[in-house]
Image (cartoon, grey):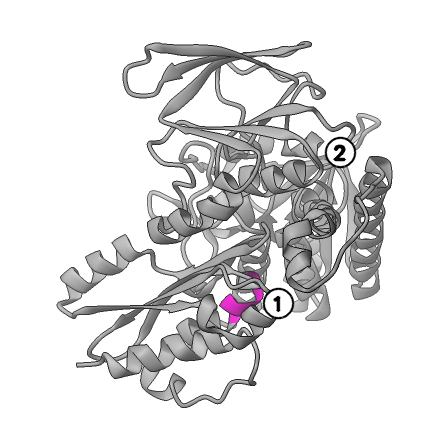
Amino acid sequence: MSDASAASFDFDLIVIGAGYGGFDAAKHAADHGLRTAIVESRDMGGTCVNRGCVPSKALLAASGRVRELADAEHLRGFGIHAAPVRFERQKIADHANQLVATIRTNLTKTLERAGATILRGKGRLEGPQRVAVREASGIERVYSARDVIIATGSDPFVPPGIETDGRTVFTSDEAISLEWLPRWIAIIGSGYIGLEFADVYTALGCEVTMIEALDRVMPTFDPDIAKIAARKLIDGRDIDARSGVLAKTVTPGSPVRIELVEMASREPVETLEVDAVLVATGRVPVSKYLNLESVGVTTNRGFIPVDEAMRVLVDGNPVPHLWAVGDVTGKMMLAHTAAAQGSVAVDNILGHQRLIDYRSIPAATFTHPEISSVGLSEADAKELAAADGFELGLVRSYFKANSKALAELESDGLMKLLFNRSSGEVLGAHIYGLHAADLIQEIANAVARRQSVRELANEVHTHPTLSEVVEVAYKQAAAALV
C-alpha cells in the first residue's frame, strides 16, 4: 500500500466504542503504528469498567469479607471468636466507585500514551470506510478510515412486561452503585449476574427470592456443578429459588408487585410483593443506531455476524475493511473475549492472519466459592465424540481430598474434566470451589494448545496448593486412556 493512499484517510483505523474490546483493539493498533481513533459517547471503559466486572468484583470482595467475619461456625472451626460484624453500606459503595474511577483514568491515559485519538460522541457508519461522530453539543463530523472496528457492546435485557424505574426495579447497571439494601429483593434470572448479586445481597443481610424461567436454577452451568454449587450458594443462604416460573409483569413502587406465572402453561402462580427487583435476564447488543444498512449489513437479533478473523459478514462474505468485536458479535459475552477479539481483528488488519479460538476462553462467576469453566460442555463434548467417533472421558476431582482446601476449612468443591479417551486431548473443564476462577487458567492453556493429559499428568504442582485438584484430575484422566 502506498503512503499516498494511506494519507488520503483521516485515520488508518477508527474503533467505535471504548469498552474492553474497543480499548484493546485501539491500543494494539496504536502500539503497532496505526493512526488510530476511538469513539465513545458514554464513560471510557464501557460496561466492564463502569457497570460490570470491575465494580461488581469490588462489591463481592467487600461483601465476601462481611460473610467471612459473620460466619461464626466457620471461624469456630479455627478456634476464632469474632465480635458481631458491622459494615457501612456507603463505604462499600465508595470502594466500588473509586475503583471504577481509577481504572477508567488508567485506561484513558494508556490510550493517550499509545497515541490514539479519543473522539467523544456517538459513532455510526456513513457508508464504507466512513464514520460519523455526533458530539454531545449536536455537532456532527464525518471521518474517513482505512479500517473500521465496531465495538459497541451490549446493554442489560429487560423482558417485556417488566417496567424499570432505576430504584425499586433495576438492572445490574444500577445495582453496582449499591444505593440501598432492600430487606427483600427478587432477582430475576440465575445466570452469573444473578448469582453474583445474590451473593452480595445475602452477605449484607438481605433476603432474596430468585426467579428462573427455565426448568432448573443455574441453567447455563454444568448440571453436576450447578447441583453441588446450589447447596451452598442458594440452599445454604437466605434465598428462595424458584424455577419454571416467569415474571409476567413487574410493577415498580413500594412494594414492587411481581405477577408470577408457570413458564410452561402460563397459568398464574402468585403475586409477590417485595422491596426491590433486580432484572438479571442477560444482555442485548447495542447496534440499532450504527447505520449498518449503509454498508448492507443485516444483524441477527441485533448481533453483527462475523467470521473467526472478526471480519463483518454479509451473506457469509466479508465486508472489506469492516470488523466487529465484543458483545455486539454475541459470541461469548465476556470482557476478556472482547479484548481477545479486538487484538485478533487488529492482527488481521496488520496483515498477520489470526483466528480466534473460543474453546480456550475461560469464564468465571465470582461467588463465594467461585465457579469457572473452559472448553466444551458435557453435552457438546458428547456430540463431538459421537460425530468424530471417539470415546469421551470424564473424571471428577474433589476439593475435600485437597490439603490446602482442608487447611482453609473450605473443602466444598468439585472439578470435572472432559477429554478424548484415545488421544488424551483436554476438551473442557468445569470447577466449583475455592479460587475456581484462578484454577481454570491452567486448563484453558492446555485447551489452547490442544494438549493431551498424557503430558499434563507429569507436570509437577506445588504442594500444598489448590492447583493439585487439577493435577489429580489430569492423573485420573491419563489412567483412563484407552
Q: Nearer the viewer, residue 217 or 310?
A: 217
Q: Is residue 180 above or below residue 98?
A: above
Instruction: Indicate which disc residue 323 carries.
Output: none
For the point 45% across and 38% down, the residue is 297
The crowding category of the residue bearing disc 1, from other C-alpha atoms within 10 Å (few below 14, some 14 to 19, many at least 20), is few
The residue to which callout 1 is attached is 408
Residue type (three-letter) at the residue carrying disc 1: Glu
Residue type (three-letter) at the residue carrying disc 2: Leu
Image quadrant containing the N terminus: bottom right
Q: Is residue 86 above or below residue 241?
A: below
- In the rendering, at what x and y percent does residue 49 appear? 72, 48
Decide whether the magenta segment is chiefly helix, strand or loop.
helix
- Identify the mark nearer the N-term, 1 or 2: 2
- In the rendering, at what x and y percent does residue 61 appear? 72, 52
For the point 70% across and 30% down, the residue is 174
- In the rendering, at what x and y percent does residue 315 appear? 33, 43
Image quadrant containing the C terminus: bottom left
The span shown in magenta is: 437-441
Report helix, strand or loop for mark 1.
loop
Place residue 275 in its image quadrant: top right
- In the rendering, at what x and y percent does residue 87 appear? 83, 41
Q: Is residue 354 visible?
A: no
Q: Is residue 406 above or below residue 362?
A: below
Q: CA distance from mark 1 to mark 2?
A: 30 Å
Q: Nearer the viewer, residue 300 or 98?
A: 98
Report helix, strand or loop for mark 2.
loop
